[in-house]
Image: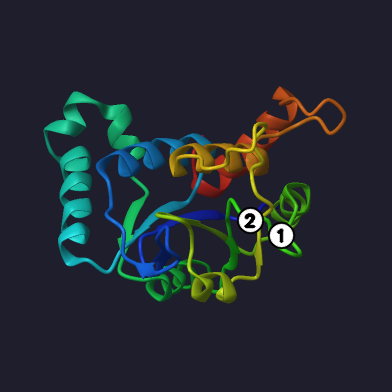
Amino acid sequence: MTSPIYIALIHYPVLNKQGDIVTTSLTNFDIHDLGRTSATFGVEKCFMVTPVEAQIKMVDYIKKYWREGVGERYNPDRSEAFKNIEVCKDLNETCLTIEKLHGTPAKLVATSARESKKPILFKELRGQIASSHQPVLLLFGTGWGLSPEIIDRCDGVLEPIRGLKGYNHLPVRAAVAIILDRLLSPHDEESGFASSEMGGSLHRERSEREGIK
């Protein structure tokens, strides 16, 4: 029993350096790298969330190229990474898509580089994922982070990734990979290192859900 995991990269509403609500630009690098990261960790879908019609069309064009065009024949691995990339105009559409797939609303978990008053600990969320069927949607912000409006909608905020030298502004692609590893990769509780035995069990369960032999 594990929760289906979804991620969403939010481009609106997010904050800029001054704390204003803005729309950020979607980048080609994020689409490619988050697709690869999602495929690596068995994420059900990776949503690119933007209200900008031109950027929605860009995601559709890039996905079609790698899934149906020359890109599929040139690089089948990249084609596989694009399988679960989706684009939505807002968080409401994203949540509705997940609810239609599972018949139940997703647990919304915000991520942030900032400390929050009562964060969800990685260990806590790992336990919830391992013992529940409720889908989990991890929200990642662009710019200078998710807006208060988005965070207020969430069931909680995940504890931040903490750096060592006081600098704490990871690229979102790096943050996604680190967080998915901490939440989904099997770790021996004593050593903290990945366990191949646990990994095999997790892989089998996810494969059975996806119909992969």
Q: Which comes before the other along the chain, label 1 or label 2?
A: 2
Relative to residue 53, is residue 7 drawn left or right?
A: right
Rendered position, 32 above or below 26: above
| Residue projecting furthest to the front | 18
Name the residue that disc number 2 marks.
Answer: 3
Q: Residues within 10 Å of mark 1 (few under 14, many from 20)?
A: few
Task: Residue lying at the far right in this picture: please name it.
Answer: 190
Which quadrant of the view contains residue 183? top right
Give the labeled residue for mark 1: 132
Q: Are marks 1 and 2 in contact (CB under 8 Å)?
A: yes
Q: Is residue 106 left or right of residue 182?
A: left
163 or 48: nearer the viewer: 163
- Residue displayed at 44% across by 40% down: 173
Please tell me which residue lies in front, 97 or 171: 171
Please say if 117 is above or below 35. below
Helix, strand or loop at label 2? It is loop
Q: Is residue 82 visible?
A: no
The one nearer the camera, 180 or 199, is 180
Q: Nearer the viewer, residue 161 or 202?
A: 161
Above or below for 39 versus 127 = above
